[in-house]
Amino acid sequence: MGDMDLQIARQSATLRTQVEDKLRQAISSGRFKPGQRLVERELCESIGVGRTSIREALRQLEAEGLITSYPHRGPVVSTITYEEAAQLYSVRALLESYAGKEFAENGTAQDIHTLNEAVAEFAEAAESGGGSRLIKAKTAFYDCLMQGSGNVFVKQMLTSLHNRVTLLRMTSMTQPGRLNHSVEEIKEIAAAITDRNGAKAAAACKYHIDMAAKVALDYLRKTSENDGD
């Protein structure tokens, strides 16, 4: 009986993870926009799972800050303020520059190979203009960067920050000219790591986040000004 319960729980967790990923992708791609109410019945129909899986996934995304639940209204895609975004990018720049340095100095040859493959895929996705492919490729790149750093705590903290950045990622990458710059910046990161140059990798990571932050913060500033009109 005990083994049966464990088996069911494992299957349930796998399904829940798939639902969480689908919802994260929908938010990061802009299909579900900040402030949009998420109706359980509609999510069940569009994803093709029961309410239990949807509710478990929504709880996880709420813990990550992607969703906010309001009394009498239910779950809503979270909004992020200018101040929150500024703080988030500042911490992210510190952690990713450290991850880049550690990767360059201590990463395995296989990790570096995987990173360069992820960069090539991101560049191809940028050329094709595919939104969902772009998000998937960028996520794969960051996964490689965190894995290569060899520091489990940096990976945990950056994963949490990246989940919050999901609310801004398409905003940043879809601004005019930003995507091409993003591709070049990521190539610089990979080149520095491949050359085992820790200082250069750290600087390249910080520059990449600083540029993404500038675009996202400019967008948020303009949005708040328009809302105030």
Image (cartoon, helix red, strand yellow):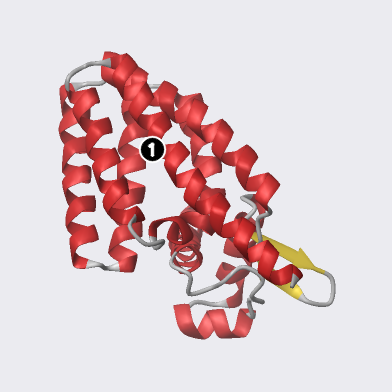
Rendered view: 105 above or below 69: above
Expressed as whole percent of the image width and height from the top left, the position of residue 15 reads: 45, 63
Quadrant showing the C terminus: bottom right
| Residue indicated by mark 1 | 208
Decide: few, some or many residues near mark 1? Use Cα within 10 Å; few <14, some 14-19, many ≥20.
many
The image quarter in which residue 5 lies: bottom right
Relative depth, front residue between 110 and 12: 110
Quadrant showing the N terminus: bottom right
Expressed as whole percent of the image width and height from the top left, the position of residue 29 reads: 43, 67
Element on which disc 1 rests: helix
Rendered view: 123 above or below 159: below
Amino acid at dot 1:
His
Relative depth, front residue between 11 and 79: 79
At horizontal 63% and vertical 79% (from top left) the residue drawn is 40
Is residue 106 among what the camera can see?
Answer: no
What is the total number of numbered labels drawn onto the structure image? Answer: 1
At horizontal 44% and vertical 46% (from top left) the residue drawn is 212
Relative depth, front residue between 210 and 1: 210
Expressed as whole percent of the image width and height from the top left, the position of residue 94 reads: 51, 26
Q: Is residue 216 left or right of residue 211?
A: right
At horizontal 26% and vertical 47% (from top left) the residue drawn is 183
Q: Is residue 3 left or right of residue 51?
A: left
Expressed as whole percent of the image width and height from the top left, the position of residue 20 reads: 50, 61
- Residue found farthest to the front: 229
- Residue found farthest to the right: 71
Rendered view: 207 above or below 160: above
Q: Is residue 17 left or right of residue 129?
A: right
Is residue 99 among what the camera can see?
Answer: yes
Rendered view: 115 above or below 77: above
